[in-house]
């Protein structure tokens, strides 16, 4: 890997163009590498892993002056961006979209096309690729998504050489072990930064990662923020790659659509899972609680002055396991506000395997490489066969995931991507998350593999403090002090967690609750109050019949006295036993408000 000199300003790259025909390790996330390709005078095709990333660039949540520019969902679609010279190509490649692209290409000036990986083969047939430079952004995804987007990845690897130049760019590049064979001969450059702000990691192991996430949310709800040292965070960004687990957290914490934003693929399965909860986009207005799936782990800009990024991983759900050297640094760079004191902080909440029932990584690698060797031998033999023999063998060899058929040459070639994907996933699931020590060790190694990035492991005591359940009396005192507060969100959160707390304040009062202290004793006192009240209520009809008569007009103050003598608060509380009609009568020449007793209620 060769160092490349760069010009930098305030943490951003200042270059006329990206380096050509190479793999470019820009080292720092959010340093403006993609912006260079978007704004210079060169024709560019920018290939990215997700549609969310394209929408985030075509419909940025903030303009160049930092003003909010949130558009309605219906106003966001593939095609030419309304705010910048950028054609977003994603979703269904319709006849209308092709026409819009053709119109865009006919205009003067530099052309900027941003598309998902899978659109590259189709796009190559519609443009003259030799007139365009290609940027494969977030290229480490080629190994991560291969298992479920094989055609998209191969479409990139089969066509990148057709462009005027190419640049595979990432701040978290693929290690040599997992690098695609098609890029073996491609030069690698690394940006030579003078200084880099360290990533601050808080690894927090727990047996129940989603429960801990819920506890963190409840703390935000209860006190309005989470405190680290003297700094306060008022917003939370949870990176959880499981819509099902997000729904469980939402239900447990009683969040509403007004409280949270859920950024995931807008598809029937997710809509069904979330039910009444709405699916949002990274370009929608932020909320106090933001839940983000892998749709927006990379390249997407979020804005928050106090938000903290929380990564939640569960070994029992492989989709939620994130690599320390690639995924975590990407997430750490998502919040763009330079004044956010937590913007380089990631709290990684995880559990580990209780039992390691698998062989170690070295043995797994040996076994997979052996299978790859056998596949190569079979391919060599096939390619030497006669045409008739090839017809007999083709169907059999097609079953091997380690072989790929090249129709133009009528040959089988080695598909090394499958082997590397299997090794990558094996290491992630069975090695990194095998123990807390293994995960922390991976953090220590991550800063040395490719970059000068420093990992600063922080003490997790502030998370312990934030998730510690406070005593009921502490919560009650806070609630009582908020009697005239306008912070309805926090009050409602406390009432949802303690449905009886409002009754405790009004019926028992502050002093009695302080004497009782525990919620168990407070609940018992409320129950006793209700039983006593019910017993008193049974005697009220007889007492009323001896005190008032049907057809009487009783002044309001006098009737209130009757009510209070019976253990009630207001005159109207007697409406349970009396049909009352309000009126004003003159008594001793003065208008007096009161009630007519029209009848008794049995």
Image (tube, rainbow, N blue to C red):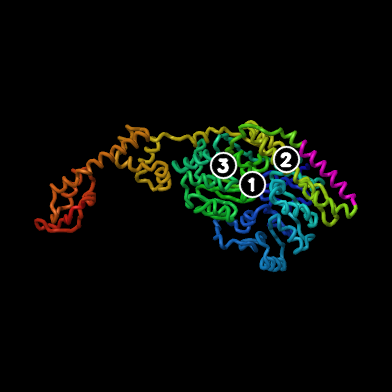
Q: Which residue is mark 1?
A: 10
When the figure is inspected, residue 231 is found, relative to residue 134, above or below; the finding is above
Image quadrant occupied by the N terminus: top right
Alpha carbon of mark 3 to alpha carbon of mark 1: how far?
26 Å
Secondary element type, mark 3: strand
Q: Nearer the viewer, residue 31 or 15?
A: 31
Using the rendered view, name the quadrant where residue 174 is placed. Answer: top right
Tag of residue 423: 2
Residue 22: percent from left, percent from top: 78, 49
Secondary element type, mark 1: loop
Q: Can I make out residue 521 in this image?
A: yes
User: CB under 8 Å between callouts 1 and 2?
Assistant: no
Task: Count the marks.
Answer: 3
Q: Nearer the viewer, residue 373 or 348?
A: 373
Q: Main secondary structure of the magenta part?
A: helix
Q: Which residue is mark 3?
A: 310
The mark nearer the N terminus, 1 or 2, is: 1
The range drawn in magenta is: 366-385
User: Mark 3 or mark 1, which is nearer to you?
Assistant: 3
């Amino acid at each position: 890997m060769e160092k490349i000199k760069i010009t930098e300003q305030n943490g951003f790259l200042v270059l006329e163009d990206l380096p050509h025909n190479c793999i470019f390790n820009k080292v720092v996330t959010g340093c403006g590498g993609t912006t260079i390709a978007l704004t210079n005078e060169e024709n560019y095709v920018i290939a990215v892993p997700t549609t969310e990333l394209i929408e985030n660039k075509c419909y940025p949540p903030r303009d160049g002056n930092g003003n909010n520019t949130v558009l309605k969902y219906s106003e966001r679609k593939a095609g030419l961006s309304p705010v910048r010279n950028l054609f977003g190509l994603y979703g269904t490649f319709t006849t209308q979209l092709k026409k819009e692209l053709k119109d865009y290409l006919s205009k003067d000036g530099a052309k900027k096309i941003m598309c998902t990986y899978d659109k590259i083969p189709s796009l190559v047939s519609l443009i003259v690729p030799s007139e365009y430079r290609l940027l494969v952004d977030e290229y480490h995804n080629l190994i991560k998504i291969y298992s479920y987007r094989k055609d998209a990845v191969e479409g990139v690897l089969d066509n990148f050489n057709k462009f005027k130049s190419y640049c595979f760019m990432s701040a978290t590049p693929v290690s040599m072990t997992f690098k695609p064979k098609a890029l073996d001969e491609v030069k690698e450059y690394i940006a030579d930064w003078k200084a880099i702000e360290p990533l601050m990691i808080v690894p927090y192991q727990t047996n129940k990662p989603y429960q801990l996430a819920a506890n963190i949310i409840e703390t935000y709800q209860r006190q309005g923020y989470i405190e680290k040292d003297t700094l306060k965070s008022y917003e939370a960004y949870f990176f959880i790659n499981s819509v099902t687990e997000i729904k469980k957290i939402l239900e447990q914490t009683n969040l509403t659509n007004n409280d949270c934003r859920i950024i995931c693929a807008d598809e029937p399965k997710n809509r069904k899972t979330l039910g009444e909860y709405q699916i949002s986009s990274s370009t929608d207005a932020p909320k106090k609680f933001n839940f983000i799936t892998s749709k927006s782990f990379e390249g997407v800009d979020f804005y928050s002055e106090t938000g903290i990024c929380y990564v939640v991983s569960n070994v029992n759900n492989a989709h939620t396991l994130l690599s320390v050297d690639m995924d975590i640094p990407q997430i750490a760079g998502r919040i763009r506000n330079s004044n956010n004191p937590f913007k380089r902080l990631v709290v990684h909440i995880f559990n580990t395997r209780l039992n390691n029932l698998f062989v170690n990584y070295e043995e797994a690698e040996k076994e997979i490489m052996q299978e790859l060797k056998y596949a190569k031998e079979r391919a060599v033999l096939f390619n030497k066969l006669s045409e008739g023999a090839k017809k007999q063998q083709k169907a059999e060899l097609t079953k091997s995931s380690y072989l790929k058929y090249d129709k133009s040459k009528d040959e089988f070639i080695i598909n090394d991507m499958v082997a590397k994907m299997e090794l990558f996933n094996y290491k992630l699931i069975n090695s990194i998350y095998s123990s807390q020590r293994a995960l922390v060790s991976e953090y220590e190694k991550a800063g040395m593999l490719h970059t000068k990035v420093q990992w600063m492991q922080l003490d997790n005591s502030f998370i312990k403090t934030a998730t510690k359940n406070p005593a009921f009396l502490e919560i009650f005192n806070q609630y009582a002090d908020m009697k005239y507060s306008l912070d309805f969100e926090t009050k409602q959160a406390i009432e949802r967690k303690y449905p009886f707390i409002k009754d405790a304040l009004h019926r028992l009062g502050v002093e009695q609750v302080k004497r009782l202290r525990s919620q168990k004793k407070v609940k018992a006192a409320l129950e006793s109050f209700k039983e006593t009240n019910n017993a008193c209520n049974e005697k009220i009809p007889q007492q009323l019949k001896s005190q008032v008569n049907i057809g009487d007009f009783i002044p309001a103050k006098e009737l209130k006295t009757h009510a209070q003598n019976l253990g009630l608060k207001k005159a109207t509380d007697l409406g349970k036993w009396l049909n009352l009609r309000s009126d004003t009568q003159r008594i001793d020449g003065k208008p007096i408000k009161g009630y007519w007793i029209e009848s008794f209620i049995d």
